[in-house]
């Protein structure tokens, strides 16, 4: 991964997940119909579920639909890789891709698509996993569905929807539940999915520096909280890392614990390299790339976050520290 060249022409991909009734369809309708000045390819499982009026759709007999605001809408009747490959032929017609995980309780299979296929991986980058959450019904969902917690744990961005249906105390309690599962995701409060598209898409959400810019002390809490058995842990190393040591170590970790690791992401400082290296993984599927130079005066500290089950903090810390360059 360390030898990968910077891929500035890669198309950002947002994976949108959320339970039925959370408000995901309303959010998608806004993206597909509002004049937000951007063009997106939206890949969904069944076009009919969106409920978009027929007069908003062009070429309705085709698998790829063009909306009146310039967005493209696709139905997944077959292979997601094939759909994405087809979209690449229209590369100049959109700014990013949104993949909705309708019918999939766990966003991992869709997210992994953008790691496992070399062609897709070369032309796209997983920008963020966005989870839409029902503020009113989340407490019950966490009680009756383990998948609800997994959707939150996977998220880089959380759209906490239907906040108009709960009191201030209820909202605070729901957000506290979310934070117990995932301390690192950005949370947006919305009613009927009303939020700027610019706060949802093209976020470079795996870039921990973005989080640190907003919440400078978010890595200082050494204890981990958990919901059921999902935990989030973060580590920091001040010395430059040896890329070969890091890749060898993280490869073993993902091979041994990939089933339990929902998300792994970090910003790394490699010895002799002036650029920041962004690493991220979904289960066992990993990817990484240099994302630009360190800023003047910025501490070149390597930070790594694990979100998953059965995490051994001392072992992960020792392993990460063992990748320091000699």
Image: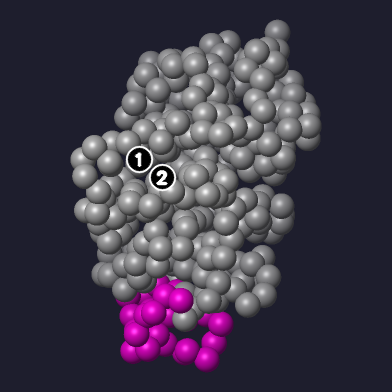
Q: Is residue 231 left or right of residue 169?
A: right
The residue at which mark 2 appears reads as: 139
Q: Is residue 203 visible?
A: no
Q: Is residue 138 visible?
A: yes
| Above or below: residue 137 compared with residue 48 | above
Find residue 16 and name its label: none
Residue 83 image position (x, y, % from top left): 61, 71
The one nearer the camera, 281 or 38, is 281
Q: Element at badge 2?
A: helix
| Above or below: residue 101 compared with residue 10 | below
Q: Earlier in the sequence, mark 1 or mark 2?
A: 2
Q: Locate residue 71: give its quadrant.
A: bottom left
| Above or below: residue 244 compared with residue 91 | above
Q: Identify the coloring.
A: one colour
Q: Locate residue 26: give its quadrant.
A: bottom left
Residue at 22%, 53% in the rendered image = 164
Q: Pointers 1 and 2 in contact (CB under 8 A)?
A: yes
Residue 65 located within the stretch drawn in magenta? yes
Quadrant including the N terminus: top right
The one nearer the camera, 132 or 204, is 132
């Amino acid at each position: 991964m360390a030898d990968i060249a910077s891929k500035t022409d890669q198309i950002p991909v947002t994976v949108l997940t959320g339970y039925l009734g959370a408000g995901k369809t309303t959010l998608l309708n806004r993206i597909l119909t509002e004049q937000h000045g951007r063009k997106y390819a939206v890949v969904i499982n069944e076009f009919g579920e969106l409920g978009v009026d027929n007069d908003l759709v062009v070429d309705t007999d085709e698998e790829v639909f063009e909306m009146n605001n310039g967005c493209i809408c696709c139905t997944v009747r077959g292979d997601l890789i094939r759909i994405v490959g087809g979209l690449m032929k229209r590369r100049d017609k959109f700014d990013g891709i949104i993949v909705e995980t309708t019918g999939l309780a766990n966003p991992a299979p869709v997210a992994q698509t953008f790691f496992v296929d070399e062609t897709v991986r070369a032309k796209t980058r997983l920008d963020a996993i966005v989870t839409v959450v029902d503020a009113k019904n989340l407490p019950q969902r966490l009680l009756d569905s383990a998948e609800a917690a997994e959707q939150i744990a996977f998220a880089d961005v959380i759209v906490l929807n239907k906040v108009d249906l709960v009191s201030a105390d209820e909202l605070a309690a729901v957000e506290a539940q979310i934070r117990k599962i995932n301390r690192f995701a950005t949370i947006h409060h919305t009613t009927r999915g009303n939020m700027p598209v610019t706060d949802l898409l093209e976020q470079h959400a795996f870039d921990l520096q973005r989080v640190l810019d907003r919440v400078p002390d978010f890595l200082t809490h050494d204890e981990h909280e958990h919901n059921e058995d999902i935990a989030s842990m973060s580590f920091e190393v001040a010395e430059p890392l040896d890329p070969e040591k890091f890749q060898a170590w993280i490869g073993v970790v993902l091979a041994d614990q990939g089933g339990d690791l929902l998300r792994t992401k970090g910003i790394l400082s490699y010895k002799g390299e002036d650029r920041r290296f962004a690493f991220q993984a979904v289960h066992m599927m990993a990817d990484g790339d240099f994302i630009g130079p360190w800023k003047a005066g910025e501490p070149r500290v390597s930070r790594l976050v694990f979100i998953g089950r059965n995490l051994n903090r001392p072992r992960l810390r020792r392993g990460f520290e063992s990748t320091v360059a000699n």
